Every structure is written in C-alpha cells, then in structure tokens.
Amino acid sequence: MFNYVLSAGISGIESYLVRVEADVSEGMPVFELVGYLGVEVREAKERVRTAIKNSGFFFPVKHVTLNLAPGDIRKSKTGYDLAMAIAILITTGQVDDKLVKDTVFIGELTLNGEIKGVEGILPIVLNAKKEKIKRCIVARDNLAEAAIVEEIDIIAPNNLKELASYLNDEIKLSPERVTDILPSDNSSPADFKYVSGQKVIRRGIEVAVSGMHNVLMVGPPGSGKSMIAKCIPTIMPLLSKNESLEVTKIYSVAGKLPGKGGIITERPFISPHHTITDIGMIGGGARIKPGAVSYADRGVLFLDELPEFSRASLEVLRQPLEDGKVTIERNQGSYIYPAEFMLVAAMNPCPCGAYPDRNKCNCSLPAIKRYLSRLSRPLLDRIDICLNVNPLKIEDLFPDKIPTNESSSDIRERVEKTRFIQKKRFGEGGVLFNSKMTAENIKSYCSLGEKEESFLKKSLKKMDISARSCHKILKIARTVADMKEEEKISIASLTEAMHLNKNFEI
C-alpha cells in the first residue's frame, strides 16, 4: 500500500515542501528511509518506530519504505518525524487520510510520542500559506511563532495519539491565532537623552541613520562610543510587519527566538566579541547557520575595538556590505541569508587609547601606524562616515547644569521624515537609502549647481581622494540635504558631508 503526506524543509531562510511517501508491502521486515538524508533524519527510524508503538498503535511487521521527495535536495534536522509517523499510520489504515492532503506536518517525536518543537517554523508556515495549504500541524512549543501567520489554520496537538484522534474525527482541535504582533514604540532602555555632551557626534549619528551610512567612531576609552552605539537602534524607524517577519525568520531557522517564540518587533543590535571567527561573522559551519551579519539584519552590527578583530573576520564583511545578503556555497546547495544592516564600528586612536594627548600617550608613531594598519583600505572604503569622539568635559557630566538632551523619539521623528523623502525618490527601484545609490542614481539625484560643483572640485583637489570617496561625499551630502528638505545640494551640505567623511590616515 502507498500513501503520502506533506512536510517541509529549510534552505537559507526559505522553505520548500517535502513529500513523505510511505510504502508498506509484503516481504522481509525492514524499515528503510531514502531521499538524500542527513544523519539526524536517518536516525528518525528508531524515534518513529518507538513513538508509534508507545502511542498505542502497531508498527507493521512488513517491508516499510519511506521516501522524502524531492530526492536531489539534502534533508536535515528532525522536523520530518511527525510526517513519517502519520504517513505510516495512514498507509496501514490506522488513521483516516481525509484531512492530510491539504496539511503540512512538522515536528520532532520523542520515544513516548510527544511532539517537540523544531527550528524554522515561521518560514515553513509562510511557504505553506503561499502554496495554498489549508493547515499546518506543529508542536505546542512552536505555536506562538506559527500562529502569527494569517489565513492558514495552525493545529498544535500535544502528542501523536492526540493528533491521530483529531485526524480520525474523534476529538476537535481548534485552530490557534496570534493577532497583535507589533509594538506601539521601542522599548529599549537605551536613549539619547542619557548621552551627555557630544553634540557633534549626535549630529553625525543622526545623518548616518537617516541615510543608512556605515559609521566609524574613533576616540579614547570612556568617551561614550559604546553607549552611543547602543542608542542607534532607538532612533531608527520601527520595524514594519514585513521587516519583522524577515528578521524573525532568520532567528527562527537558527533556533534563537527569545522566550517561547513569537515575532521580533525591535531592531536587532548585535555586538560580537573581537574573538569571533569568520564563520561566526558570516555564517556557515558544519550545520549551516546564519552569522552575526544576518542576526543584525534590519538593525545594527556594532564592532567595538575594531582593530582587535582578526583580518579574516573583517574581510568577510565586504560582500554583505555591498550586496545586503550572504551566499554560502556548499556541496549540498546554496544558502542565502539576508544581511541588510548598518555597520557601526568603534576604535581607539592608538594601542593605549590616549593619542594625541602626549601627556598620557607613550605609543611610538610606528606602533600607532601598525595599530591602524590592521584595517584594510577596502573595508574602510565601505565606511561612509568617520567621527572623532573627544573625551567628555567635566561640565557635561552634570546634566542639571546644562539643557536637557533630545530624546531618541524626537530624533527618530526627523529620521523618519528623511527616510520618507528617500522612499518617494527611489520608489520601487530597489534602492532604499542614499547610502545604496548607484553611479546612475548619483548622477540623477546628486546633480550640483555651478557654484557647488566648483566648490567640490577645489575641495577634492586639496583633499586628494579617490573617486569612490567622491561618491561617498555626494551620498552623505544628499542625506544632509534631505534632512534640511533641500531639493538641490547646497555648499553647506557638501561642507558637512566632507567633514563627516574625513578619514584618518593609515
């Protein structure tokens, strides 16, 4: 006898349907699994056999073959257990097949038949909805995550026996639903109103966030670089529903959703330690997983003490900074993870951190040069804005004596206005921010008047910079002009852009 049920697999952060086909025939009692399977899937034989028996059903003493199609895609992880068990129970007549044709089954089985949660439920349910599947059967552990998706029934039985009773119409299980998924505001404890002084830096950060420009802060320890970086997500626009789903899918396939699951509603802030490897940064490994750049998708990747990171872990940033995604090639296929993040880096000006104060800094010039030369020019070329963070003044540490700082919510309002201008400008052309403008976009949207062009040419000759840096200045100037609601880029906007782009020498 032959029958099949539907399950699902994961590739990158996307899902695909898998047909779990069961054939039970006369012959030598054997239980075979085929279909280009990983180790954990092949081990499902004993889990499924034992779970069926311990749930009060019989396992056929016949030749049992399960095929997971398509056979040219490698199947991994334990989410196929439930579909395998149901396929066998239907084929042997122990479960009615009336409901299974429009149903996706996903879950791991324990030896006593309990259904356990697995990674990647959200992309599975989203794909099932896209494929016009009526319902998904998931573990209760995955309920908060799966029930976010609308227009598809989510059924979450506790165990295999309960699921079989539901399929046989012996009990009723109501579909589950989660509705209110987006917050009204950002709940992060960080806020720019707690950042003392640093007016120039606050302005530079606002420009960077408004145009999604990557930024490097250079300054001595204790000047507030890390605190400022933690405040950056609080002035970014709130995540849209589609952005929330994209971020949640990444954390879902990695098994890193906080708490009991559900949707992520705040912009990520990822700050890896400088000992991170290139695989930890970009993703991959023996069991393919996203890296730090993907966990920071739609948020901030903060690299503190930038020169302390290994050369390998920094150089792998170049592709995602350009493309906004990561492609990992393996023998079994390609895995694509989103990586649309804002890079924020911080570093000391020298090994001891006190340069250029020679009363405190004893570093030799060759030592300082070696320290700075740990950063490659190609990486620095992908950082638009460089901010010199000066030590705080004593009077800045006593906020009662100075005017109250602007809060993050006030700054975010201005950022949202600037982002809206960019959205109207670029439309559906694929470019979202000024920082991502192509050469064609720059020609169209960064045209200068005669005075402005003459001023820029004279300034560039004095600065002796590359064509890439010239384009960066124009992108930053376009953002500054948008913040001022200027249709044309003014000399004042160009001047501020050149000041923000001014890099330190290596």
Image (spheres, rainbow, N blue to C red):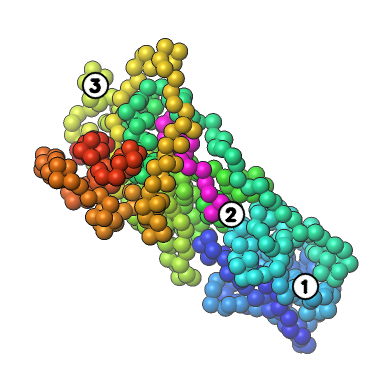
- The answer to if 473 sits in the magenta stretch is no
Mark 2 vs mark 3: which is more N-terminal? 2
* Location of mark 1 (residue): 99
Which residue sits at x=66%, y=47%?
180
Which residue sits at x=42%, y=66%?
329
Please say if 224 is above or below 168.
above
- Circle 1/circle 3 CB separation < 8 Å: no
Q: Image quadrant for the N terminus?
A: bottom right
Other-residue count near label 1 (Cα within 10 Å), few / some / many at <14 / 14–19 / ≥20: few
Which residue sits at x=46%, y=24%?
194
Q: Nearer the viewer, residue 168 or 429?
A: 429
Q: Nearer the viewer, residue 393 or 12?
A: 393
Q: Position of residue 88 (x, y in %)?
A: 76, 75
- The answer to if 233 sits in the magenta stretch is yes
Looking at the picture, which amino acid does disc 1 mark? Leu
* Location of mark 2 (residue): 252
- Which one is in front in this view, the residue at disc 2 or the one at disc 1? 1
Residue at the extreme bottom: 26
Looking at the picture, which amino acid does disc 3 mark? Asp
Q: What's the CA distance linking mark 1 and mark 3?
A: 75 Å
Q: Position of residue 419 (x, y in %)?
A: 41, 45
Q: Position of residue 326 (x, y in %)?
A: 42, 58
Residue 460: in sight, yes or no? no
Range of the magenta residues? 226-242
Q: Secondary structure at mark 1?
A: loop
- Circle 2/circle 3 CB separation < 8 Å: no
- Which one is in front in this view, the residue at disc 1 or the one at disc 3? 1
Q: What's the CA distance linking mark 2 and mark 3?
A: 48 Å
Q: Secondary structure at mark 3?
A: loop
Q: Secondary structure at mark 2?
A: helix
* Location of mark 3 (residue): 357
